Image: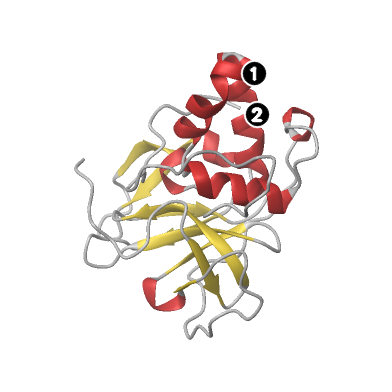
Amino acid sequence: MSRVATPYEAGDVVATTDGRGVVLATKVENFSFPQSEDNEHADVEASPELPAYVVALEEGGSAVYREEALETTTFGETQLPETKDERLTGIVDESVGSEGDLPEGMGRREALEYWASVGSWKACVSDRENELGERTAEAQCTAIKDLIAGTERWREHFRRTFLRDRRQLCCLRIPEIFGFPSTSGSRFTRTPRRKNLLHDQNAPRSG
């Protein structure tokens, strides 16, 4: 599927009614977003004309928003811009089991700042594999994304929900629903990412 130009893209730092966050992905097709540990989902309507944005929140977890609910900001801003609209879904913030694979000293804030500089799981692996090797880089990037997304379910296949016919279901890679300029001096910064990294097409197939 060709990329669609949208006001926000993966890696952008934004203000929401729930505080500061980072855009993990832009969705332009209907999809289901995980809501709780008992495998519930919320159906979200999205299209090129009405995109939806998955945002990892600084306070924890991730949720889905419309453009009108977001304002551009930075990690250096102490006073966030005011936003109007509420989120489209609840916040998913589940326990994850991959903390042991995180880089030493990386907490949530550092993970968000680092992810802003890469924008996707694939770019994260590319950034780290020369130093760590492919498998260790994949494990670290998976752990970082688990942490900021607040769930491991981005690793799995998820349902694309067609609101006109609930019987029609097909599979997409969940990395497409889940991915900040970095703060200077951070040990986890990298060179600026390329723009328009909206999809993680090469993420691991299983948890």
Q: Is residue 207 left or right of residue 167?
A: right
Task: Using the numbered discs, state the Cα–Cα distance from disc 1 to disc 2 in whole angstroms.
Answer: 6 Å
Where is residue 87 shown, x and y percent of the image? 51, 72
Query: Which residue appears at 42% of the width and 26% of the height?
Result: 202
Q: Secondary structure at mark 1?
A: helix
Q: How is the image coloured?
A: secondary structure
Mark yes or no: residue 16 visible.
yes
Where is residue 86 shown, x and y percent of the image? 51, 79
Q: Alpha-carbon neighbours of circle 2 within 10 Å: few (<14), some, or many (≥20)?
A: many
Seen as rendered, the residue at the extreme front is 185
Q: Which residue, given by chain and number where applicable, does mark 2 sit on? A: 140
Inspect the image, locate mark 1, and give the three-letter code of the amino acid beneath it: Thr
Q: Is residue 24 left or right of residue 160?
A: right
Whether 193 is drawn above or below 141: the answer is: below
Where is residue 46 shown, x and y percent of the image? 31, 61
Q: Is residue 69 left or right of residue 131?
A: left
Query: Which residue appears at 57% of the width and 78% of the height?
Result: 17
Where is residue 16 shown, x and y percent of the image? 54, 74
Whether 10 is drawn above or below 89: the answer is: above
Residue 195 is marked as none
Q: Secondary structure at mark 2?
A: helix
Whether residues under marks 1 and 2 lie with C-beta atoms below 8 angstroms apart, the answer is yes
Looking at the picture, tell me which residue is in the foreground, 143 or 73: 73
Inspect the image, locate mark 2, and give the three-letter code of the amino acid beneath it: Gln
Q: Alpha-carbon neighbours of circle 1 within 10 Å: few (<14), some, or many (≥20)?
A: some
Seen as rendered, the residue at the extreme left is 2
Q: Which residue, given by chain and number where applicable, does mark 1 sit on? A: 136
